[in-house]
Image (spheres, rainbow, N blue to C red):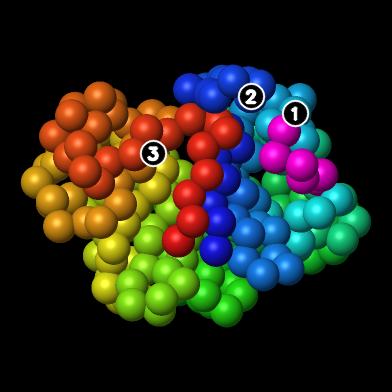
Amino acid sequence: MNVKIVYDSEAKEGFMRDWGFSCLIEQGVWKILFDTGASGAILTHNLNQFGAQVEDLAIIVLSHKHWDHIGGLRAALHPGVAVCLPSSFPLRLKKAIAKKAALVVEVSEPKEIIPGVYSTGEVGRPVKEQSLVLRTSDGEGVVAVVGGAHPGLEQIMAAARCIGDLHGIIGGFHGFKQLELLRDLKLIMPCHYTRRRKELLHLYPETAVRCGAGAVLTL
């Protein structure tokens, strides 16, 4: 399974950076886009840099409704794509998405999306957010992929551990302060809107990986 960072506030050469987050998850024939960043133009440019087209996307998973995570959605929608979103999304937004997509799947509880890829279900309040949980290729653990961690990274980690032994975490950690809770993880990739991003990279040099559009991880 590959995780490719499509949208981030940092970027590798040839990719565009911006405020927002998106990553492409490739599992066999499946291509799943998690969040869409803020700009459709930047999203599609960076997808193209990976050799991917919007039409290749089978599923789009949205973590929460903030603009820097769903702003590029319109550019990513196509008639063959399924969109997996939190049940708490506004009805008007659900209806607008349904007009452009093949299917809208509302998620409130933990759910298997495809084999090896799971949703935590909605976590937290007042901002309800879903994260993805990916089973590693050796089957021995899982890696959480987080949008904005508004419920608190601790809650999301607990939800991921209900699915499997947590080996790693990728995405936005928001204002998470209990950095010692990440000590035993094998992979830490702090991305868009992680306030203590530099500190994490310094604190865990053997397991923390620099994020940025264009980065690729194999799980």
State the mark number for residue 15.
2
- Residue at 39% x, 48% y is 170
- Residue at 52% x, 44% y is 216
Disc 1 + disc 3, Cβ < 8 Å: no
Residue 113: % across, % down: 59, 72
Query: Which residue in the protein does label 1 denote?
Result: 45
Q: Amino acid at mark 3?
A: Gly
Q: Closer to the N terminus: mark 2 or mark 3?
A: 2
SS type, badge 1: helix
Residue 56 located within the stretch drawn in magenta:
no
Q: Closer to the N terminus: mark 1 or mark 3?
A: 1
Query: Which residue in the protein does label 3 denote?
Result: 172
Marks 2 and 1, how far apart in space? 8 Å
- The reply to whether residue 174 is visible in this rendering is yes
Residue 157: % across, % down: 27, 59
For the record, the magenta segment spans 49-54
SS type, badge 3: loop
Q: Amino acid at mark 1?
A: His
Of the pair 149 and 209, the residue shown nearer to us: 209
- Overall secondary structure of the magenta stretch? loop
Residue 136: % across, % down: 42, 69
Residue at the limit of the structure toward the left, as seen here:
180
SS type, badge 2: loop
- Name the quadrant of the C terminus: bottom left
Residue at the limit of the structure toward the right, as seen here:
79
- Residue at 63% x, 24% y is 15
Of the pair 7 and 15, the residue shown nearer to us: 15
Q: Amino acid at mark 2?
A: Phe
- The reply to whether residue 123 is visible in this rendering is no
